[in-house]
Amino acid sequence: MIEGPEKKEPENTKTSTSKKIVSKDAGDVSGKETPSKKLTVGYLDVVVIALIAAFIAVTAYDKFFASKVVVVDLAGFVKEQTELLSQGKIGKEEITARLGQFQDFIKKQPQNQTVIIKDIVLANGREISFSPGTAVKRVGSE
């Protein structure tokens, strides 16, 4: 096959593949691209976000993971219960139930709390108190 000379289109009739960028501003019809407003984060924003994240992390660690020592007055509880038993205000069944409630109270403490008897701690122990309250079913009179 014999091919003839290539036909060239005149330069002025070529179709342009470049697109004209039109600004979104209503008044600008020049076709020039205007820089769009981008969200910029300054140093102050970064510092504030970092402080908030650090505060949340430290608070969560303290509440859920840090070990804490709490103190319970076992001797005072036993002394109070024996006085009530000797006065006849409670019976043997009720004192057994109250001791069971006390044991359940100690077991229900969060895993990050270590419970120690008050007689052993010298200072700075946060004391938790237990009172049998009305949850105990009174045996006998009601």
Image (cartoon, rainbow, N blue to C red):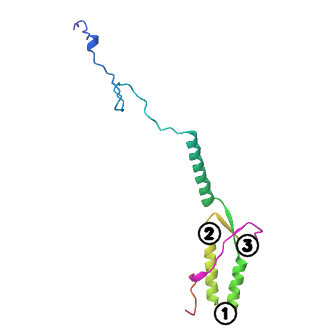
Query: In the image, what residue occupies the spot 63% across and 58% down?
Result: 62
Q: Is residue 90 magenta?
A: no
In the image, residue 120 sits, relative to residue 15, either above or below, namely: below
User: In this view of the protein, which residue sits in the foreground, 55 or 137?
Assistant: 55
In the drawing, does residue 13 fall left or right of residue 106? left
- Label for residue 118? 3
Q: Would you name the residue on which mark 1 appears?
A: 88
> Magenta segment range?
119-134
Residue 56 x, y percent position in the rendering: 58, 53
Residue at which label 2 appears: 109
Q: Quadrant of residue 119 in the image?
A: bottom right
Tell me the amino acid under the disc marked 1.
Gly
**Vertically, is 58 above or below 117?**
above
SS for tag 1? loop
Callout 3: SS? loop
* Magenta region includes residue 125: yes
Q: Amino acid type of disc 3?
A: Lys
Against 56, residue 77 (above or below) is: below
Measure how far apart labels 3 and 1 are at the Cα level.
Answer: 27 Å
Look at label 2 and name its amino acid: Gln
Q: Earlier in the sequence, mark 1 or mark 2?
A: 1
> For the point 35% across and 30% down, which residue is it?
27
Q: CA–CA distance between discs 1 and 2? A: 31 Å
Q: Reply above or below: 54 against 31.
A: below
- Quadrant in the picture for residue 28: top left
Q: Which mark is residue 3?
A: none
* C-alpha span from label 3 to label 2: 16 Å
Pick whichever, 28 or 63, lies toward us: 28
Residue 132 percent location from the top left of the image? 61, 81
| Figure quadrant of the N terminus | top left
* Tag 3 and tag 2, C-beta contact below 8 Å: no
